[in-house]
Amino acid sequence: MKEVDEAVQEILTEIFSTALVASALRLGTPLILATVGEIYAQRSGVLNLGVEGMMIVGALVGFIGVNITGNPWMGILLAALCGGAMSLIHAFLSITTRSDQVISGFALSIFGIGVTSYIGKKWIGMAAEAGFYPIYIRGLSDLPIVGPILFSQNVLVYLAFFIVAVSSWILFKTRIGLIIRAVGENPEAADILGVNVYLTRYLCVFFGGIMAGIAGAYLSLAYTRQWVELMTAGRGWIAIALVIFGMWNPVWSFAGSLFFGVIDSFQLRLQAVGIGIPYNLLMMMPYVLTILALSSISTTALAKKIGAPTALLTPYVRGEKT
């Protein structure tokens, strides 16, 4: 019995460690990036279900860009531009032609998955020529507990933290954020006050696409540093759920991203220590929680109108009441 207790304690110590939290930050970073971009798109009144497709395209384009140029920042730039370009397709369909936003987003996700599966065949299993590696900060990285967690990450993790802080400040403390929120709540009133509703929505959707592209590139250039088919593994859909989970607030969505990062890291560590549970069930954990979050929190948001933009999913036509 004593031997069993010691074995259980050893397993728990291995699972619940600073390495778990450090890994959660790395796993949560692509969710943070994609979620912030989607918050801006939805705050302006446009739902973008194409995040998954933009992320997977960003992952492949960033990987190819690095292998051609040898510069990881060039890979990030190319991924951002491709994600932004895909988002403009969605913006044109949903804002200009007023097509169904759900169908347009789904189509882009299917397109992204299909085109990367075709183009990425010859890159499967190849290592990136360059990438983003953990940074050692002298005097800080060696600190107990906080050192491995906060001061031994790659630069994109720190960039994600910065983006959350800045995006939250812009959205809630500046005139630009007020305009974005006004367009998402009452586009007619915003238009009367001289706000260009169409341009605002285009820019917000474009920003969302840029962030989704960078989030995808993070996976291939920082997390795995290789191209793997379907490597986003549904993270784009989790990001959309996190927008609702965080009540359309970058700070709360940041916390939700870290929570899902912990869950993802937890299931990976359970596999590593040899827990006798089928790995398929362990891999389901983040997605089961996504469904639970959507079913519980979205109901609250719809019932009490907490955070959800009033004009979300509603096309705007000047002179017509939406």
Image (cartoon, rainbow, N blue to C red):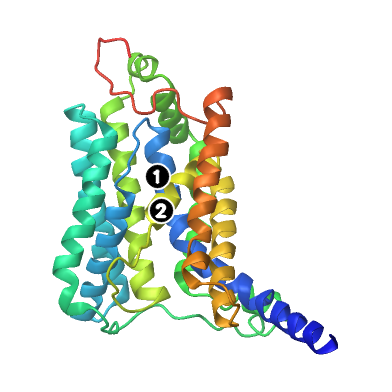
Location of residue 194 by image quarter: top left
Count of numbered labels shown in the rendering = 2
As helix, strand or loop, the secondary structure at mark 1 comes to helix
Location of residue 191 by image quarter: top left
Residue 281, percent from left and from top: 51, 65
Q: Nearer the viewer, residue 285 or 239?
A: 285
In this figure, which residue is indicated by the disc labeled 2?
34
- Residue drawn at x 32%, y 41% as measured from the top left: 48
Residue 257, percent from left and from top: 53, 55
Image quarter hosting the C terminus: top left
Question: Is 298 left or right of 44, judged from the image as shown?
Answer: right
Is residue 69 among what the camera can see? no
The disc placed on residue 170 is none
Residue 139, percent from left and from top: 66, 84
Measure the alpha-carbon separation of dots 2 and 1.
6 Å
Residue lying at the far right of the rendered structure: 2
As helix, strand or loop, the secondary structure at mark 2 comes to helix
Is residue 98 among what the camera can see? yes
Question: Is 280 left or right of 41, judged from the image as shown?
Answer: right
- Residue drawn at x 35%, y 15% as measured from the top left: 188
Residue 32, percent from left and from top: 48, 56
Question: Is 112 left or right of 268, judged from the image as shown?
Answer: left
Image quarter hosting the N terminus: bottom right
Question: Is 255 left or right of 294, judged from the image as shown?
Answer: right
Q: Is residue 153 above or below residue 101?
A: below
Mark 2 and 1 residues: CB-CB less than 8 Å, in contact?
yes
Q: What's the amino acid at mark 1?
A: Glu
Location of residue 138 by image quarter: bottom right
In this figure, which residue is indicated by the disc labeled 1?
38
- Residue drawn at x 63%, y 79% as measured from the top left: 148
Q: What's the amino acid at mark 2?
A: Ala
Q: Is residue 197 above or below residue 71?
A: above
